[in-house]
């Protein structure tokens, strides 16, 4: 199946609905349980899944900016970021430790609604030319980053990240899908 702006918008809507279901149906004990394959609890991992969409929103500004420059600029930027992969992973891990606690579950759901609404609006309003703008990415930072990514690729990345981590949840309702 081809990835299109419409299909990306739908996968974001589906992830948002799924996120609400996961958060709303989970028990406190389940949220405190360790996830599978990470050092986070389910609660912390849910925040991290939300955080992936927040990162997408920031990455869009970066891609738009670097798209106005010669590709060598973003290549050098990506190389510099790749050199800082280890500190990035530490900050990424630590940032998700308290996110759910700071926002609370209702706050996480409100932020998820807000950020995904914005990403969907971007998909619905952007021209093909705008969606095709791209830049080099630090491939060491995430298994779903590719050397060259367009705005459309970045918008799709959010759900790739979400789905990857969703498989690591140990919530009883996470096994339904």
Image (tube, helix red, strand yellow):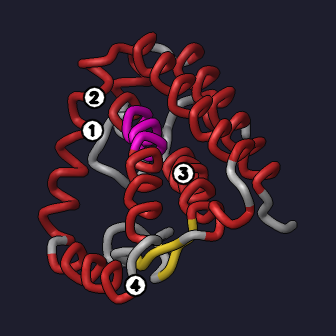
Taking 31 as reference, is 131 left or right? right
Q: Earlier in the sequence, mark 3 or mark 4?
A: 4
Dot 2: element: helix
Q: Earlier in the sequence, mark 4 or mark 1?
A: 4
- Quadrant in which residue 40 is drawn: top left
Q: Please give the label number shown on residue 16.
A: none
Taking 173 as reference, is 54 left or right? left
How far apart, in angstroms, are the residues tagged by discs 4 and 1? 34 Å
Q: Earlier in the sequence, mark 3 or mark 1?
A: 1
Question: Taken as a whole, is the magenta stretch helix, strand or loop?
Answer: helix
Magenta-drawn segment:
46-54
Q: Earlier in the sequence, mark 4 or mark 2?
A: 4
Residue ID for mark 4: 70
How far apart, in angstroms, are the residues tagged by discs 3 and 1? 16 Å
Q: Position of residue 97 (x, y in %)?
A: 22, 35
Please report contact status of discs 3 and 4: CB closer than 8 Å, yes or no: no
Dot 4: element: loop
Q: Residue furthest bottom?
A: 72
Residue ID for mark 2: 99
- Between circles 4 and 2, the one closer to the viewer is 4
Q: Position of residue 46 (x, y in %)?
A: 44, 34
Q: Position of residue 19 (x, y in %)?
A: 58, 29
């Amino acid at each position: 199946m081809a990835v299109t702006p419409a299909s990306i918008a739908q996968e974001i809507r589906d992830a948002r609905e799924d996120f609400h279901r996961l958060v709303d149906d989970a028990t406190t004990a389940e949220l405190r349980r360790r996830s599978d394959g990470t050092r986070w609890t389910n609660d912390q991992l849910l925040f991290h899944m939300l955080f992936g969409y927040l990162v997408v929103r920031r990455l869009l500004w970066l891609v738009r900016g670097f798209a106005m420059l010669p590709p060598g600029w973003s290549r050098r930027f990506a190389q510099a970021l790749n050199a800082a992969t280890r500190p990035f992973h530490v900050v990424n891990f630590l940032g998700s430790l308290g996110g759910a606690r700071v926002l609370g579950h209702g706050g996480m759901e409100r932020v998820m609604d807000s950020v995904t609404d914005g990403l969907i609006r971007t998909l619905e309003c952007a021209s093909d030319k705008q969606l095709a703008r791209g830049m080099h990415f630090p491939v060491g930072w995430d298994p779903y980053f590719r050397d060259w990514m367009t705005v459309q690729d970045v918008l799709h990345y959010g759900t790739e990240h979400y789905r990857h981590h969703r498989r690591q949840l140990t919530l009883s309702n996470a096994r339904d899908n």
